[in-house]
Image (cartoon, grey):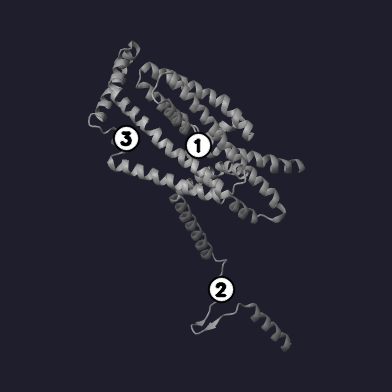
Amino acid sequence: MATSKKIKKAAASASQPKRKISNFGVSGLPINKTQPFYFGFVATLGVLTAIVLLRALESVSQIFVLILVSLFLATGLNPAVEALRKRNLSRGSAVAVIFSSVILFVVFFAFVVVPPVVNQGTNLIENAPQLLDDLMKNQTINSLNDQFGLIDTLQSRLNSVTSDGTLLISTFGGVIGVGQSILSGFFTALTILVLTLYFITSLPQAVSLGLSLVPSSRRERVGKLTNAVIERVGLFVGSQILIAAMAGVFVVLLTSILGMPSPIAIGMIVFVVALIPLIGHFIGAGVVTLIALTQSPLIGLIAFVAYVLYVQIENYVVTPRIMKRTLSVPGAVTIISALIGSSLLGLVGGLLAVPVAASIILILDEVVIPRANKA
């Protein structure tokens, strides 16, 4: 009996957590995690941590947007780099050629397109009072002005912002606002350029690093799907460039027929803004119409109507066919995904919506649907 009691006592003492003896005394027993106070404290700490993380993510949301845009551009330029690599060029040399071409295009755009646009904008401001007077000669517009005072309001507003040359300053919110807008745009463009260069240079290494985290039994299939997604994003960028180039050619022909000044410069402006999903053509139509108004109200009306008709043909005929052929995305999905993406993330969402939809369709076709058929 005594022996059994000793054994039980030894077992009980062994089951108890050992308390560490040090120069600072004996350590106490562990905290009882079943107590309500402990659970409430841990839960509160978790909620506070989540709030801090959410606020931190919100504060750096602009950085994430720049990263997404740069990654999208790098993925879009990757097919051009791969095409040059097939001509026995190293990846570094191919990236250098593509980026040199991009920088040359930006420089050419800045020195060839910007001056005519500034001149036409100045001419439009100077001729705006005469254009409004010409509109007043129309009986229909004159009657509308008598009822609603539209032309009188425009004339008074135009005189107030042009009498002392404050149109540009008032548009950007003062002299400080102009400087901030210029610096912000410059540093944003520089950041996107540097990140894009980094991403496109290290894209294969990034893909390999990501695949190394995948189980070896699935690595080959996941690698093929990843490369297919990257290829689809590149096809989307190529399709956007093709569609924008078609819009630019159309505007060059339209402005040449109407006798507008600097048709090539106007066409390049439309080519650049047409790369922006959904709102690009609104900007293009505004630029073309404003420049056309410097000639006459009739030419401005013709240019606006012709541009709107072209946009309708592009949206409902050209774009769905090109996207379906290059990305295997139905036309309805193209339009719906662009609308949803723009509603969620604005311009960036509209830019990423179509390739994301194409990638989701690829994953559904290759992974989800085959598993459903086997179930």
User: Reading the chain from its start, which is encountered first: label 3 or label 1?
Assistant: 3
| Lower sequence index among marks 1 and 2 | 2
Query: Of the residues shown, which amino acid type is indicated by label 2?
Result: Pro
* Closer-to-camera residue (164/339): 164
Q: Which residue is mark 3?
A: 171
Task: List the residue tagged with mark 2.
Answer: 30
Q: Quadrant of the C terminus?
A: top right
Residue under pointer 1? 342
Q: Residue furthest right?
A: 374
Residue 153 in view here: no
Rendered location of residue 200, percent (x, y): 54, 48
Give the left or right position of residue 290, taking residue 281 as reference: left
Q: Give the CA separation, mark 3 to mark 2.
A: 66 Å
Question: In the shown orientation, is residue 244 left or right of residue 259?
Answer: right
User: Would you call the spot at circle 1 few (<14 residues within 10 Å), some (14-19), or many (20 or more)?
Assistant: many
Mark 3 and mark 1 residues within 8 Å of each other at the beta carbon: no
Where is residue 35 shown, x and y percent of the image? 55, 66
What amino acid is at disc 3?
Thr
Q: Quadrant of residue 183?
A: top left
